[in-house]
Protein backbone atom coordinates (compact mmCIF):
# COMPACT_ATOMS: atom_id res chain seq x y z
CA UNK A 1 0.00 0.00 0.00
CA UNK A 2 1.40 3.53 -0.76
CA UNK A 3 2.52 5.47 2.22
CA UNK A 4 1.59 9.00 3.31
CA UNK A 5 2.96 11.88 1.15
CA UNK A 6 6.17 13.37 2.38
CA UNK A 7 6.70 17.09 3.26
CA UNK A 8 7.20 19.69 0.50
CA UNK A 9 10.68 20.36 -0.54
CA UNK A 10 12.34 23.80 -0.48
CA UNK A 11 11.45 26.34 -3.26
CA UNK A 12 13.63 26.20 -6.30
CA UNK A 13 15.66 29.08 -7.75
CA UNK A 14 13.59 31.64 -9.79
CA UNK A 15 13.95 31.12 -13.50
CA UNK A 16 14.97 33.94 -15.90
CA UNK A 17 12.19 36.27 -17.20
CA UNK A 18 10.46 35.09 -20.28
CA UNK A 19 10.23 37.13 -23.47
CA UNK A 20 7.56 39.97 -23.65
CA UNK A 21 4.32 38.72 -24.92
CA UNK A 22 2.38 40.44 -27.71
CA UNK A 23 0.24 43.61 -26.93
CA UNK A 24 -3.27 42.78 -25.95
CA UNK A 25 -6.32 44.54 -27.47
CA UNK A 26 -7.14 48.23 -26.39
CA UNK A 27 -9.59 48.46 -23.54
CA UNK A 28 -12.79 50.52 -23.42
CA UNK A 29 -12.60 54.38 -22.87
CA UNK A 30 -12.69 55.19 -19.22
CA UNK A 31 -15.04 57.63 -17.51
CA UNK A 32 -14.33 61.47 -17.75
CA UNK A 33 -12.39 62.66 -14.81
CA UNK A 34 -13.38 65.52 -12.54
CA UNK A 35 -12.45 69.11 -13.75
CA UNK A 36 -9.22 70.38 -12.44
CA UNK A 37 -8.91 73.62 -10.44
CA UNK A 38 -8.83 76.98 -12.39
CA UNK A 39 -5.40 78.07 -13.31
CA UNK A 40 -4.04 81.64 -12.90
CA UNK A 41 -5.21 84.26 -15.55
CA UNK A 42 -3.00 84.71 -18.50
CA UNK A 43 -1.45 88.05 -19.58
CA UNK A 44 -3.72 90.70 -21.30
CA UNK A 45 -3.61 90.39 -25.02
CA UNK A 46 -3.04 93.27 -27.46
CA UNK A 47 -6.03 95.54 -28.34
CA UNK A 48 -7.87 94.37 -31.39
CA UNK A 49 -8.72 96.49 -34.43
CA UNK A 50 -11.83 98.74 -34.08
CA UNK A 51 -14.71 97.22 -35.95
CA UNK A 52 -16.83 99.15 -38.49
CA UNK A 53 -19.88 101.17 -37.30
CA UNK A 54 -23.03 99.14 -37.25
CA UNK A 55 -26.26 100.21 -38.94
CA UNK A 56 -28.85 102.31 -37.02
CA UNK A 57 -31.49 100.17 -35.42
CA UNK A 58 -35.22 100.74 -35.84
CA UNK A 59 -36.92 103.40 -33.71
CA UNK A 60 -38.56 101.89 -30.69
CA UNK A 61 -42.22 102.45 -29.79
CA UNK A 62 -43.18 105.76 -28.12
CA UNK A 63 -43.32 105.53 -24.37
CA UNK A 64 -46.32 106.44 -22.24
CA UNK A 65 -46.78 110.10 -21.21
CA UNK A 66 -45.06 110.82 -17.94
CA UNK A 67 -46.64 112.52 -14.95
CA UNK A 68 -46.67 116.31 -14.81
CA UNK A 69 -43.74 117.76 -12.94
CA UNK A 70 -43.95 120.17 -10.02
CA UNK A 71 -44.64 123.81 -10.85
CA UNK A 72 -41.43 125.79 -11.04
CA UNK A 73 -40.80 128.92 -9.04
CA UNK A 74 -41.63 132.29 -10.60
CA UNK A 75 -38.79 133.84 -12.51
CA UNK A 76 -37.48 137.31 -11.94
CA UNK A 77 -39.20 140.18 -13.81
CA UNK A 78 -37.85 140.87 -17.27
CA UNK A 79 -36.35 144.20 -18.27
CA UNK A 80 -38.67 147.11 -18.89
CA UNK A 81 -39.55 147.48 -22.54
CA UNK A 82 -39.25 150.65 -24.60
CA UNK A 83 -42.02 153.27 -24.42
CA UNK A 84 -45.12 152.27 -26.34
CA UNK A 85 -46.62 154.14 -29.25
CA UNK A 86 -50.16 155.05 -30.21
CA UNK A 87 -52.29 152.09 -31.16
CA UNK A 88 -52.53 151.00 -34.76
CA UNK A 89 -56.29 151.68 -34.85
CA UNK A 90 -57.12 155.26 -33.86
CA UNK A 91 -58.92 158.31 -35.16
CA UNK A 92 -59.51 161.94 -34.25
CA UNK A 93 -62.33 164.22 -35.32
CA UNK A 94 -61.42 167.91 -35.26
CA UNK A 95 -63.54 171.07 -35.48
CA UNK A 96 -62.56 174.73 -35.46
CA UNK A 97 -64.57 177.34 -33.55
CA UNK A 98 -67.78 175.34 -33.22
CA UNK A 99 -69.03 177.77 -30.49
CA UNK A 100 -72.00 175.51 -29.69
CA UNK A 101 -74.54 177.21 -27.37
CA UNK A 102 -76.56 174.06 -26.67
CA UNK A 103 -77.22 173.57 -22.92
CA UNK A 104 -78.53 170.01 -23.28
CA UNK A 105 -77.96 167.42 -25.98
CA UNK A 106 -75.40 166.09 -28.46
CA UNK A 107 -72.50 168.44 -29.27
CA UNK A 108 -70.44 166.39 -31.75
CA UNK A 109 -70.02 162.79 -32.90
CA UNK A 110 -67.02 160.83 -34.23
CA UNK A 111 -67.69 157.54 -36.09
CA UNK A 112 -65.10 154.81 -35.46
CA UNK A 113 -64.50 151.25 -36.78
CA UNK A 114 -63.63 148.86 -33.91
CA UNK A 115 -61.85 145.61 -34.83
CA UNK A 116 -62.36 143.35 -31.80
CA UNK A 117 -64.95 142.59 -29.11
CA UNK A 118 -62.35 142.14 -26.34
CA UNK A 119 -60.49 145.45 -26.71
CA UNK A 120 -61.32 148.76 -25.05
CA UNK A 121 -61.93 152.23 -26.48
CA UNK A 122 -59.88 155.10 -25.15
CA UNK A 123 -61.55 158.45 -25.83
CA UNK A 124 -60.92 162.05 -24.90
CA UNK A 125 -62.35 165.48 -25.57
CA UNK A 126 -60.00 168.45 -25.72
CA UNK A 127 -61.52 171.88 -26.17
CA UNK A 128 -63.14 174.93 -24.59
CA UNK A 129 -66.04 174.51 -22.10
CA UNK A 130 -67.75 177.33 -20.21
CA UNK A 131 -70.61 178.47 -17.96
CA UNK A 132 -71.90 182.05 -17.90
CA UNK A 133 -74.03 184.36 -15.75
CA UNK A 134 -75.24 181.97 -13.04
CA UNK A 135 -74.69 181.22 -9.36
CA UNK A 136 -74.14 177.73 -7.85
CA UNK A 137 -74.67 176.26 -11.31
CA UNK A 138 -73.30 173.14 -12.94
CA UNK A 139 -73.21 171.47 -16.36
CA UNK A 140 -72.00 167.96 -17.19
CA UNK A 141 -70.24 166.92 -20.41
CA UNK A 142 -70.03 163.18 -21.17
CA UNK A 143 -69.39 160.51 -23.82
CA UNK A 144 -71.80 157.99 -25.34
CA UNK A 145 -71.14 154.89 -27.45
CA UNK A 146 -73.87 154.21 -29.99
CA UNK A 147 -76.17 156.39 -27.91
CA UNK A 148 -75.49 154.82 -24.49
CA UNK A 149 -73.13 155.97 -21.76
CA UNK A 150 -70.24 153.70 -20.80
CA UNK A 151 -71.01 151.21 -18.02
CA UNK A 152 -67.81 149.15 -17.99
CA UNK A 153 -66.39 150.23 -15.71
CA UNK A 154 -68.23 153.59 -15.40
CA UNK A 155 -69.31 156.69 -17.32
CA UNK A 156 -66.69 158.95 -18.92
CA UNK A 157 -67.66 162.50 -17.95
CA UNK A 158 -66.62 165.82 -16.45
CA UNK A 159 -68.41 168.79 -14.89
CA UNK A 160 -67.99 172.57 -14.71
CA UNK A 161 -69.34 174.27 -11.56
CA UNK A 162 -69.48 177.99 -10.80
CA UNK A 163 -70.58 180.25 -7.90
CA UNK A 164 -71.15 184.02 -7.76
CA UNK A 165 -71.46 184.26 -11.50
CA UNK A 166 -74.30 186.81 -11.46
CA UNK A 167 -74.06 188.61 -8.10
CA UNK A 168 -73.13 192.24 -7.36
CA UNK A 169 -73.82 193.27 -10.93
CA UNK A 170 -71.16 190.91 -12.37
CA UNK A 171 -71.78 188.47 -15.20
CA UNK A 172 -69.01 185.89 -15.26
CA UNK A 173 -68.32 184.23 -18.61
CA UNK A 174 -65.35 181.95 -17.96
CA UNK A 175 -63.92 180.04 -20.94
CA UNK A 176 -61.41 177.29 -20.17
CA UNK A 177 -59.77 174.59 -22.29
CA UNK A 178 -60.57 171.25 -20.63
CA UNK A 179 -59.89 167.56 -21.29
CA UNK A 180 -62.27 164.70 -20.42
CA UNK A 181 -60.75 161.24 -20.91
CA UNK A 182 -61.29 157.55 -20.13
CA UNK A 183 -61.39 153.97 -21.45
CA UNK A 184 -64.67 152.14 -22.02
CA UNK A 185 -64.63 148.32 -22.02
CA UNK A 186 -67.07 145.81 -23.54
CA UNK A 187 -67.89 147.86 -26.61
CA UNK A 188 -68.82 145.54 -29.48
CA UNK A 189 -66.71 145.52 -32.64
CA UNK A 190 -67.96 147.23 -35.76
CA UNK A 191 -69.17 150.78 -36.28
CA UNK A 192 -69.19 152.81 -33.04
CA UNK A 193 -70.71 156.29 -32.93
CA UNK A 194 -68.76 158.12 -30.22
CA UNK A 195 -70.84 161.11 -29.08
CA UNK A 196 -69.94 164.07 -26.85
CA UNK A 197 -72.94 165.49 -24.96
CA UNK A 198 -73.82 168.20 -22.45
CA UNK A 199 -76.53 167.94 -19.80
CA UNK A 200 -77.53 168.48 -16.18
CA UNK A 201 -75.36 167.68 -13.18
CA UNK A 202 -77.08 165.47 -10.60
CA UNK A 203 -79.08 167.71 -8.25
CA UNK A 204 -78.78 170.87 -10.37
CA UNK A 205 -81.01 172.47 -12.96
CA UNK A 206 -80.15 173.99 -16.29
CA UNK A 207 -77.49 176.67 -16.88
CA UNK A 208 -75.99 178.62 -19.75
CA UNK A 209 -73.29 176.42 -21.30
CA UNK A 210 -71.13 176.78 -24.37
CA UNK A 211 -68.73 174.35 -26.07
CA UNK A 212 -65.77 175.01 -28.38
CA UNK A 213 -65.60 178.82 -28.48
CA UNK A 214 -62.92 180.51 -30.64
CA UNK A 215 -60.55 177.50 -30.69
CA UNK A 216 -59.99 173.99 -32.07
CA UNK A 217 -61.90 171.11 -30.45
CA UNK A 218 -61.27 167.40 -30.95
CA UNK A 219 -62.59 163.95 -30.09
CA UNK A 220 -59.86 161.30 -30.07
CA UNK A 221 -60.71 157.55 -30.26
CA UNK A 222 -58.23 154.68 -29.96
CA UNK A 223 -58.72 150.91 -29.75
CA UNK A 224 -56.53 149.59 -26.91
CA UNK A 225 -55.54 146.13 -25.59
CA UNK A 226 -57.67 144.44 -22.91
CA UNK A 227 -56.74 145.37 -19.30
CA UNK A 228 -54.48 143.16 -17.21
CA UNK A 229 -56.13 140.64 -14.89
Image (spheres, rainbow, N blue to C red):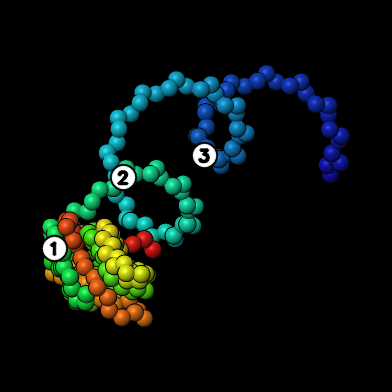
Pick the front one: 220 or 176: 176
Disc 2 target residue: 83
Q: At x 27% / y 79%, what residue is drawn?
A: 206
Between discs 1 and 2, the one toward the N terminus:
2
Q: Secondary structure at mark 2?
A: loop
Q: Earlier in the sequence, mark 3 or mark 1?
A: 3
Q: Secondary structure at mark 1?
A: loop
Do the residues bearing badges 3 and 2 touch, measured as CB atoms within 8 Å? no
- Location of residue 173 in the rendering, given as x and y in whole percent from the top left corner: 27, 64
Give the labeled residue for mark 1: 98
Mark 1 → mark 2, Cα distance in angstroms:
35 Å
The answer, for residue 111, to whether it is visible in the render is: yes
Residues packed near mark 1 inside 10 Å, few (<14), some (14 to 19) or many (20 plus): some
Between discs 3 and 2, the one toward the N terminus: 3
From the top left corner, tell me how far across and down residue 177 is, in percent. Answer: 26, 57
Q: Is residue 224 visible?
A: no
**Residue at image location 76% in from the left, 20% down from the top:** 13
Res 120 quadrant in image: bottom left
Residue 29's label in the rendered image is 3
Q: How far apart are the two marked residues, 3 and 2, measured between alpha carbons? A: 103 Å
How would you rate the neighbour count of disc 2 (Cα within 10 Å): few for under 14, some for 14-19, many for 20 or more? Answer: few
Amino acid sequence: MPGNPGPSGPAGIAGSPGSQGSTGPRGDKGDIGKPGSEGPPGPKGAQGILGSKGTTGQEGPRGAKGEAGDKGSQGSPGPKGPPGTLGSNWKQCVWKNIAHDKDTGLIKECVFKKHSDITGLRVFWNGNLRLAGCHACCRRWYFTFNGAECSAPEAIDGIVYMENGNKSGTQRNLHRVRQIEGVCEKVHKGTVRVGFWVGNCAGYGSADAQTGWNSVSRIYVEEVSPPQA
